[in-house]
Image (cartoon, rainbow, N blue to C red):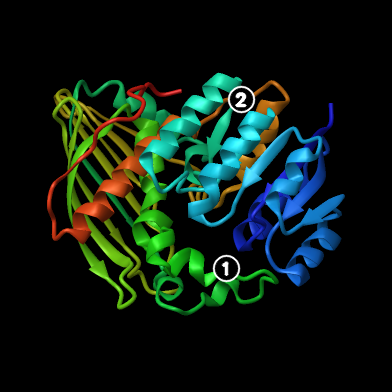
Amino acid sequence: MTLKAAVIGAGHFAYRMHIPVLAARDEVTLDSVCRLGSEELALIREEFGFAFATENWQDVLSRDIDIAIISSPHNLHYEQAKAFLEKGCHVLVEKPMTLDPAHAWDLVATAERTERQLLVAYGWNYKPGLEKMRDMVSRIGNIEHVVCHMASFTRAIFTGGTLGQWSHVAIQPERSTWEAPDSGGGFAHGQLSHALGLLYWLTDLRAASVRSILGNAPSGIDLHDAATVRFNGGATGVLSGSCGIPTGHGFEVDIRIFGSEGSVLLDIETERLVLKLPDGQTETVEPASGAWKYSCEGPASMLVDIALGRGTNQSPGHVGARAVETLHALVASGQKNGTEFQITGGNQKGETA
């Protein structure tokens, strides 16, 4: 079976990651590509051999497509992902899945109604060994408290610059995607979303309210985030995010989950996964060196596998939707000087796929 693929929003990351993953799969034909900018569009079409290229994403809806990757700016995800789900495609959408929580839950409902799979581009969810943390979490009783921290070396892309390690890439990041307050610019949507996508895959938690403060750039977007969370069921949580890691260093992701009968610690940077149980019992997972270094081949590869009738969606829509409503509340609370933001509405489903 050969799958026909479309890539909508072929920007820097799609060019560097998603398209090469699809191109390496013998089961995939690269049919359609869309982005603004005729020169960049022509470059991508020629390099990868797409059959069709356009600057208008709606032109692709008339094509015979099986799978679609939505990698456009954050504020365009909802309309585009919904259109391709309703067309009958399995869809991978970049994170954050949407900016509006209602839109995120509507995409979940649309995927269920059309019987298509909706994946969110959370690369860590597909790293070997991390699925063992889900089993560990099931052994610590009721979750009572969570610490979720992420920091990265991304100050430059949120403050008007570029990252040196990407300077050789032919397609550069669009500054408006990362720097525009009204389009989801800022660290929370652009980076902390990764850690929340991992937290909500590992647990069934769903935020009920958020209170936050933000450290903002002159443009008004957040560079640093600090939040307290009350989850449905009563658990408490602390969220932290920062773009302040100096260049030349890797990501920090630190998730600690405390339950009534034990605790689990995940530290991506030092490659530690530790389960602590009563009476001094400790279990650890030791991945191969570098196994948890961030990359995002997993989601696009799984999109292909799912369309072929195999594989498991490890970044399903409800995970992305729970992340979106948390991010929305975090930013909204920070913009109102830490006023508690209550999360209401949406699809109440929170089971882990």
Judge left or right: residue 223 versus residue 43.
left
Q: Secondary structure at mark 1?
A: loop
In the depicted view, which residue is nearer to us: 277 or 180? 180
Report x, y in % for residue 327: 32, 48
- What residue sits 31% from the left and 48% below the top? 328
Q: Which residue is mark 2?
A: 116
Say if 270 sits above or below 86 in the image.
below
In the depicted view, which residue is nearer to us: 39 or 256? 39
Corner quadrant of residue 230: top left
Q: Secondary structure at mark 2?
A: loop
In the depicted view, which residue is nearer to us: 291 or 339? 339
Q: Amino acid at mark 2?
A: Arg
Residue 200's disc is: none
Report x, y in % for residue 241: 29, 58
Callouts 2 and 1 close, C-beta under 8 Å? no
In the depicted view, which residue is nearer to us: 8 or 169? 8
Residue 294 seen: no
Q: Quarter of the image containing the N terminus?
A: top right
Q: CA distance from mark 2 to mark 1?
A: 30 Å
Judge left or right: residue 108 versus residue 53.
left
Q: Amino acid at mark 1?
A: Pro
Q: Which residue is mark 1?
A: 173
